[in-house]
Amino acid sequence: MLIAGFFVAGCTSAVGGEALPDPESAQAEQAGTSSTGLIGNATTLDPCSLVEPSSLSQFGPAQRPEQEAYDYCRLKLSVDGGVVAVRFGLLERVRGNLEAKEVEPVGRLRIFEENPAKDRCARYILFSDNVSLIASADTVDTPGKTVPQLCSITEKTTTTIAENLISRKVEHLTYPPSSLGSFDACNAVTVSLAQIPSLPAGEVISYPGRHQCRWGQAMVPSLTLRFVLGTPSTAPGVRYETIAGKQTGVYPVDIPGRTLCVAELKHGTGREMAQVVVRMAPTTPATACAAAQAVASEAWSKLPA
C-alpha cells in the first residue's frame, strides 16, 4: 500500500510544459479512420455491400438495378409517386477543401453536406487520409417531381455507410485475370496524350479504385479513361471503327460550351466496357473524335486479354 501511494502521489505533482501526443496512439487513430484502414483494397471493394436496400425501407420500396460502374452502387426508391435514385460509394482523393459544410460526425468519421438543390442532396464521408466517399439522392428520373425526403434519404444512406465501415461490414470482389476490374486505368495511356492539343498531361487525377483516370484538372481540354458496366451506346450518331483490332463505337456528345467525343469498347462477353472521353474547347466533332480514337488505340492495346 505504501508503494502504491508513492506512485499515485508522484502522478499528481504539477509539471511545467505541455504534454506531447503519443505518436503511436495518433498513428493508430489516423489508421482507424483512413480509407485504407476501413475499406482495405479500394479496387476490389463491392460498393453495393455498403448499404442494403432494406436499410432505406422507411422511405419506400427499394430496388437494386444492374450496376452501372465498379466504383459506385445505385438503388431506386419509390417515394410519394416519384423515383429517387440513390448512388453511393465513389472514392475520390480530395484536392483542396470540400465545397460542403461539416455536419455531425458518425463515430470518428467526419461528414460533410453539399448545399441541397431542389432535385438533389449529397453528403461526403471524409477519411483521415484525405479520401472522400459520396452518397447522393436525386429525382432525375422523374423530372419536376418534388420529394421532400431527399436530404433525409441521403443522411440515412451516409450514416448507414459510416456505421458499416466502422464495423468493418464491407465486402470485396474477386475479378478474373481478364477483367477490367483490377486494371489500373492510369497505366493504359502515356504516349497518345500528345494527340489532344494543349492537354496538361502532367495533371493526372487518379482514383483510389483505379477504375478511371483523368488528365487535365480543368474541364477543357481534358481526357478521361474509365471502365464501366453496361451496354454500348445505340445513339444514331455512333460510328463503328476498328481500333487496335477491336470494334469500337465512336460518337460526339452535344454539350454546351465544349466539344466532347467518346470512344467505347465492349470488353469480353459480360457487361464490362472501356470508354475514352475527350473534352475540348469548341471545335469540330471530327477533331475531338480523332483525338479519342488515337488515345483508344493505345489504351485498347494494353487492356487484359
Image: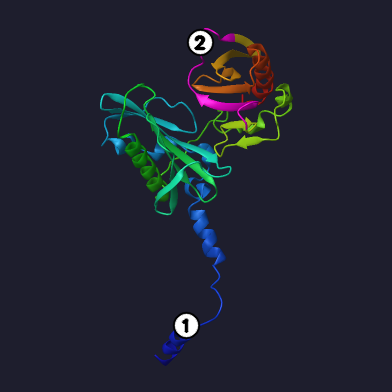
Could you say which is closer to the camera, residue 104 or residue 5?
104
Q: Amino acid at mark 1?
A: Cys
Q: Is residue 82 left or right of residue 110?
A: left
Q: Residue furthest bottom?
A: 2
Element under label 1?
A: helix
Whether residue 222 is in magenta: the answer is: yes
Q: Position of residue 168 (x, y in %)?
A: 42, 48
Q: Position of residue 265 (x, y in %)?
A: 58, 18
Could you say which is closer to the camera, residue 302 or residue 30?
30
Q: Is residue 14 left or right of residue 215?
A: left
Q: For mark 2, what is the residue?
A: 235
Q: Which mark is residue 11?
A: 1
Q: Which residues are magenta?
A: 218-239
Whether residue 95 is in magenta: the answer is: no
Mark 1 surroundings: few (<14), some (14-19) or many (≥20) residues within 10 A? few
Could you say which is closer to the camera, residue 269 or residue 22?
22
Relative vertical location of residue 90 with respect to residue 234 in this rendering, above or below: below
Relative vertical location of residue 25 with respect to residue 283 in this rendering, above or below: below
Relative vertical location of residue 218 with respect to residue 233 in this rendering, above or below: below
Q: Position of residue 125 (x, y in %)?
A: 45, 44
The colour scheme used to paint the residues is rainbow
Q: Which mark is residue 244?
A: none
Q: Position of residue 281 (x, y in %)?
A: 64, 21
Residue drawn 51% across the image and 39% down it: 91
| Mark toward the start of the polypeptide (2 vs 1) | 1
Residue drawn 46% across the image and 38% down it: 134
Element under label 2?
A: loop
Residue drawn 67% across the image and 22% down it: 295
Q: Quadrant of the C terminus?
A: top right
Q: Is residue 105 left or right of residue 28?
A: left
Q: Amino acid at mark 2?
A: Ala
